[in-house]
Structures are given as C-alpha cells and as structure tokens.
Image (tube, grey):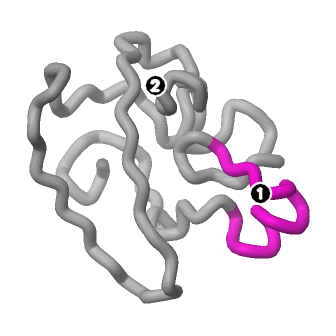
Amino acid sequence: MWRFGYPNPVNYNDNELFCGGYAVQWVENKGQCGVCGDAYHLKEPRPHEAGGEYAKGTIVRHYTVGQDIDVEIELTANHLGRFEMYLCPNNNPRHVASQECFDR
C-alpha cells in the first residue's frame, strides 16, 4: 500500500509474501500458509493479517458479486510458481478473514 501513496508502514520485503518460502511452507508448516501470504507458523496476528504490522484497514476498492476486475501483477523474480486470488466479504478491518471465507 505504501508504494501507492497510502499511509501504511514501509515494507521493502512486500514481494516476499510466499508463505516463508518452499522449505518453510512444505517442511516446517506441512503445506500451510497464512491467508495473506505470511508464514503460517508466525505468531498471530501475522504481519499482513488484521491486527498485524502492515494491515491498517485501508479500504481502497469496493466490489460487487460477479463484477469483472482488472488485476495487475509485477513479477520481480520467476520461481515457476503461480498466483491465486480470492476475495472474502469482510467489512471489519480488525477481523482476520478465514481461509474458509476465501474458499467460498
């Protein structure tokens, strides 16, 4: 958010929301990942989830069910992974959205 002028804390590692990396996600955390890309084993609130250091509750867009949206991704290093995006109706910036909500 800070890269686009929003008053969030600066996070120079914002391109590393990759669940802690392969070994952390698959060896240490048995394939689990925080819902916002943080390593699953981190103490809650995780840095990018509600209540975390970078999650300040800034709402920048509102979407309606079935709406088409444009998404832009800046790939800074190709590690042969993939992107998955899910939205969850959560209007409370202090409430951590659950994986179940994103999976609906």
- From what the image shows, is residue 91 above or below residue 47? above
Q: Amino acid at mark 2?
A: Arg
Q: Seen in the image, is 98 located left or right of residue 67?
A: right
Categorize mark 2 by other alpha carbons within 10 Å: few (<14), some (14-19), many (20+).
Answer: few
State how many labels appear.
2
Horizontal and vertical percent position of residue 66? 15, 27
Query: Is residue 42 placed above or below 61 in the rendered structure?
Result: below
Which segment did they paint magenta? 20-34
Residue 3 drawn at (x, y percent): 26, 59
Which is nearer the eye, 48 or 25?
25
Q: Is residue 1 left or right of residue 32?
A: left
Confirm whether the magenta stretch covers residue 67. Answer: no
Q: Residue at x 25, y 26 (%)?
A: 59
Is 76 or 25 nearer to us in this picture?
25
Q: Is residue 53 left or right of residue 44?
A: left
Residue 6 in the image, given as x and y percentages of width and height: 23, 43
Circle 2 sits on which residue?
104
Classify mark 1: residues with Cα within 10 Å, few (<14), some (14-19) or many (20+). Answer: few
The residue located at (81%, 74%) in the rendering is: 23
Q: Mark 1 = which residue?
A: 31
At x 26%, y 67%, the residue is: 73
- Which image quadrant for residue 39? bottom right
Q: Residue at x 41, y 63 (%)?
A: 83
The answer to whether 13 is drawn above or below residue 84 in the figure is below
Report x, y in % for residue 65.
19, 21
Element type at mark 2: loop
Quick check: is 32 in the magenta stretch?
A: yes
